[in-house]
Image (cartoon, helix red, strand yellow):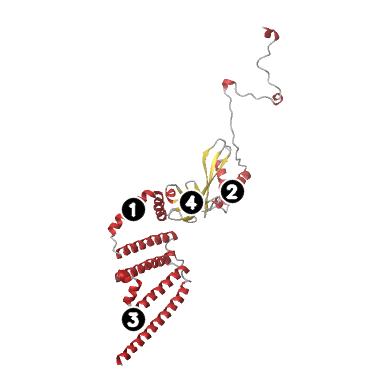
Amino acid sequence: MGSLLLTLLQLTTDTIDTFILIGGAAATGIVIWVLGNRLKTRVQTANAEVIRSALILLLTAVVAGVLLTQWGATETALSIVGVFEFGIGVGIRILLTIIMAVAAYTLTRILKRLLLGANSSTNRITSEHQRRVSFYISQVAIYIVAVFALLSLWGVQLGDLLLGAGVLGIVLGFAAQETLGSILAGFILMLSRPFAIGDWVRIGDHEGFITEITINNVRLRNLDGEHVVLPNEAVNNRTIINRSIEGKLRLRVEVGIDYDVDPDHAEAVALEALTELEEIMSQPAPQVLPVRFDDSAVILELRFWIDKPTPQRKWRATQVVIHNVKAAFRREGIKIPFPQRELMGRKETGGFRVVDDELSGQPEPDSHPPTSSTDRSE
């Protein structure tokens, strides 16, 4: 009778403990669910769902393990789920694999928030390009460490794996030379940083604005509104001209003056016309320099700078410079000559002969007189 009472009392205690454990787990699950909803306001919704689901899954596994241990049904549960045939070590390895995968993913998300987040303290001391490159390199390093750790956990011989990877790499290298070359060139572009998104560049024969830089190619929008995709390997092999990186750009316009005009006076007039314009920079100051003798004019080169260079600002500055300098030359009587040619006849042929206007309409006399009828008969 006493043993029966003890058994009933033990069952009652276990039942109470079970209900307490389940109630505590349910309360903890509710808290996790509420915190997950608040987490959506700080991170992306998909990431918040993953974190919340992982925590609830972990909580369920812990509660199930405690209940099975408390009721002494561990062996039965293991045999039911099929883990018993493989051994407890396999189950532990599977659990560690899941934990390591979740930890690696979580660490990369934390790094992304620290390096690329809008409120990151590193934003004040590094550029966006440097932070992005740092994140990509850190992400690859974390995943490589996680993969090697998992392989060691499952007893994979890394030496044999590396040997096989080397042979496979040689085969893939021959099969995908262009793709691998573009990927390698992409890393070189990200590290050397010849341009950034939004820059006005000229790459080979293509000119436009950089819209995207990926690990495989570079995309730019040219001045006609067309989107051009250039493989990274081709970009590295071409001349790159970046017109935005300095924040200013020097332009040149040539103008010719008559040989009878004083060059110093023409230079002063042109320079004064340039200094009146708001479309060009005052510092560095514009310049007017004679550069060469042309067929019918002395050529002056107008050099001036614009800030925040874009094609529209370049064309607008060139337009106002030409209009203003031409108007200033007209006011000062400085002639911009038309192309002229000087013709000279050779002395051996008698040179040129100017025909009078009154005689120009009459036919020229024939140099050979007509033959007489007597001559024709002969």
> Horizontal placement of 290 versus 237: left or right?
right
Which is more foreground, mark 2 or mark 4? 4
Tell me the number on the disc at residue 168: 1
In the depicted view, which residue is nearer to us: 70 or 51?
Answer: 70
Q: Earlier along the polypeptide chain: callout 2 or callout 1?
A: 1
Q: Earlier along the polypeptide chain: callout 3 or callout 4?
A: 3
Crowd rating for badge 2 (residues with CA inside 10 Å; few <14, some 14–19, many 20+): few
> What amino acid type should be assigned to the residue bearing mark 4?
Val
Q: Earlier along the polypeptide chain: callout 4 or callout 1?
A: 1
Tell me which residue sits at (34%, 78%) in the image: 68
Q: CA distance from mark 3 to mark 4?
A: 65 Å
Quarter of the N terminus within the rendering = bottom left
Tell me which residue sits at (70%, 9%) in the image: 373
Which is more foreground, mark 2 or mark 3? 3
Tell me the number on the disc at residue 71: 3
Residue 156 x, y percent position in the rendering: 29, 61
> Horizontal placement of 210 versus 363: left or right?
left
Residue to which mark 2 is pinned? 319
Determine whether the residue tagged by mark 4 lies in a helix, strand or loop: strand
Which is more foreground, mark 3 or mark 4? 3
Residue to which mark 4 is pinned? 229
> What amino acid type should be assigned to the residue bearing mark 1?
Leu
Residue 139 x, y percent position in the rendering: 38, 62
Which is more foreground, mark 2 or mark 1? 1
Q: CA distance from mark 2 to mark 3?
A: 90 Å
Determine whether the residue tagged by mark 3 lies in a helix, strand or loop: helix
